[in-house]
Image (cartoon, rainbow, N blue to C red):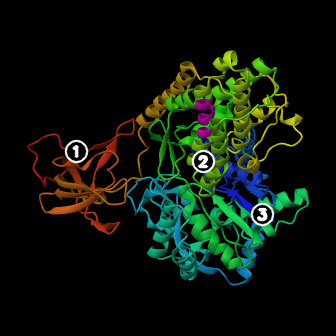
Amino acid sequence: MQNSPKRFTITAALPYTNGPVHIGHLAGVYVPADIYSRFQRLQGNDVAFVCGSDEHGVPITIKAKKEGITPQQVVDKYHAIIKESFQEFGITFDNYSRTSEKIHHDTASNFFKKLYDDGKFIEQTTEQFYDQEANQFLADRFIIGTCPKCGFVESYGDQCESCGTSHNATDLINPKSSITGNTPALKETKHWFLPLDQYESWLKEWIVKGHKKDWKSNVYGQCKSWIDDGLRPRAVTRDLDWGIPVPIEGADNKVLYVWFDAPIGYISATKEWAENIGKDWEPYWKDEDTKMLHFIGKDNIVFHCIIFPSMLKAEGSFILPENVPANEFLNLEGNKISTSKNWAVWLHEYLLDFPNQQDVLRYVLTANAPETKDNDFTWADFQARNNNELVAIFGNFINRVVVLTNKYYNGIVPKPPSLSEVDLKILSELKAYPNVIESSLERYRFREAQAELMNVARLGNKYLADEEPWKKIKTDEERTKAIMYVSIQIAEALAILSEPFLPFTSTKLKTMLCHSELNSESTWKDVSTKDVLIPSSHRIGKGELLFSKIEDKKVQQQLDKLEATKKENTVINKNPEPQKQTIQFDDFSKLDMRVGTILEAKKMAKTKKLLILKVDTGIDVRTIVSGIAESFSPEEVVGKKVTVLVNLAPRALRGVDSEGMILMTETPDGKLVFLNPDDEKVYNGAPIS
């Protein structure tokens, strides 16, 4: 246990206000951050848990274009939905702000000016993508192309959503404008860059040589990979009309890059909170005794571990994060959650469909949290965990204890004449759980911590099943008093220890146990140190169900909703894409497409999507790297005839030179298929025209 109160600054990734929050966001960021914040408050620590709506990202302008409204209307709409959903779900932010607030604009502008005045930026005129038809420079999210790292064909200009790699738009293969579908041109523009290369040795000292052993392996590994690959200057301004204007002369029509602006939102949210309650914000960001933590998803690792720390280092007066416990992704019913395809369980809709069942979703998302690998949420698992664990274990124990105490003793906790060895052993085991749960939480193992909480309920259930007070009451009333006394202590421990994980349940249980009537409520520490948590003669309330069974009908309704979404997406996918920009015959004649046969195939190490293929093209046998490993095993593709673009310039992918491209297409349901020559008599090397 901690010896003295500590100060914590805990941040949760700012959600984009281009849509509501879904279960992937909750499992990856907000539930674990809330569990940790609640736990630290229970320890008596000083916690500032902050977040807010990120309202300046390009996804907002994309959403505005789609809906035919202004960006401000978009952010106002979704900020309200997100904030209300968080509140109803029990996420205990000390402040949930928004980056459109004046305090944030001022904080971000002053931060930029401080670095600018200190000569921390490089001013460069570079070539950036420009859509001539749309008559505008293209921000990162308005450019889509093939990821140079993993080969994913729909990577954004700043980051690949498939492998999580961050890059510059000019690194993309076959870039296209998402506005018009055209291939963008390069045009000169002036911007300000943070020279990350100048912080490379410091970052290596801080992360790699300092070896953040308590950082998750995915976080440490991604940081090390970035540093080992060599860092380059990163633009912190953009040619856009939506965002915080660059606060210096000569920067007309330019705004701060959202990934410069957004993390400063943590600082401005802390300032706003401190002003509202009359505190000084600076210790939470500038005192070395403060422990700062960033809860994020894996796609934000580079921004929180490389770019933002470099910004703080450049400014010079801020502390650095002690840990960045990033989670992997949560899938839904076997498929990647997609906001654009509406393949998600939206929080605000869940709260309507399952009223007063916030803790069920919190429990399931924590039990299945993607802490070390991507995990899958299914409605069948949701139902099973509720019915077989929350109802049958936790709820069953509490119901028995409260009902029997009221039945036998009119709700008054009995005084045991003596405690048996079994009783003392149970109470001794109970005292160990706070330290066990705390150990897991301090290592950010929330699944493990919650499992230990459920073991407390299992301990109680087994104790009751072994001691059978409903039988003992007929033969040994004194022994029954001891059993029910011990059971009440376990129930009280559950009321306290469940608060970070199941806050609504904890409140309901405390009400049943009539906490307000106690002289002093027990604390987390008391569970591990006190022999008595609820004294004899205390009267508890009447019983009510903590959890209710979820019936098949409720689950089927959710599955039907997803099935309807799948059908809608299939119809959408059947609609052909618009014709691309007209080309001349000479352009087409430059493409050399041949029939080939795959001779060998193997997975590329440390990737999910890439296969390394040996292909007989008729003119040679060459190596081609193809991003099809999630759709086909190496064994499935050997011997297949395929269409190969053979005169594509070689390109290195993960250190392997790929000498061509296998041409593929997708079925309406998103399944990859080969463009196979049907006639088996077609020979390798036969041209396709």
Local secondary structure at mark 3 = loop
Instruction: Look at the picture and state if 381 lies above or below 549.
Output: below
Q: What residue is drawn where x is 63% and y is 26%? A: 396
Q: What residue is drawn where x is 66% and y is 20%? A: 472
Local secondary structure at mark 1 = helix
Q: Which amino acid does label 3 sit on?
A: Ser
Mark carried by residue 290: none
Mark carried by residue 449: 2
> Residues in magenta?
454-463
Q: What residue is drawn where x is 63% and y is 49%? A: 437
Residue 63, image x and y in percent?
62, 46
Local secondary structure at mark 2 = helix
Crowding at dot 2, Cα within 10 Å, few <14 / some 14-19 / many 20+, comes out as: many
Dot 2 and dot 1 residues touching (CB under 8 Å): no
Judging depth in this view, the residue of 62 and 288 nearest the camera is: 288
Judging depth in this view, the residue of 60 and 344 nearest the camera is: 344
Mark 3 → mark 1, Cα distance in angstroms? 60 Å
Q: Closer to the N terminus: mark 2 or mark 3? A: 3
Please name the residue that numbered disc 1 is placed on: 636
Residue 351, picture quadrant: top right
Q: Which amino acid does label 2 sit on?
A: Ala
Judged from this view, the residue extending furthest toward the top is 474
Q: Is residue 138 visible?
A: no
Please name the residue that numbered disc 3 is placed on: 4
Judging depth in this view, the residue of 39 and 619 nearest the camera is: 39
Q: What residue type is labelled 1?
A: Glu
The label nearer to you, 3 versus 1, is 3
Instruction: Look at the picture and state if 341 lies above or below 413.
Output: below
Q: Can residue 266 be seen in this view?
A: yes
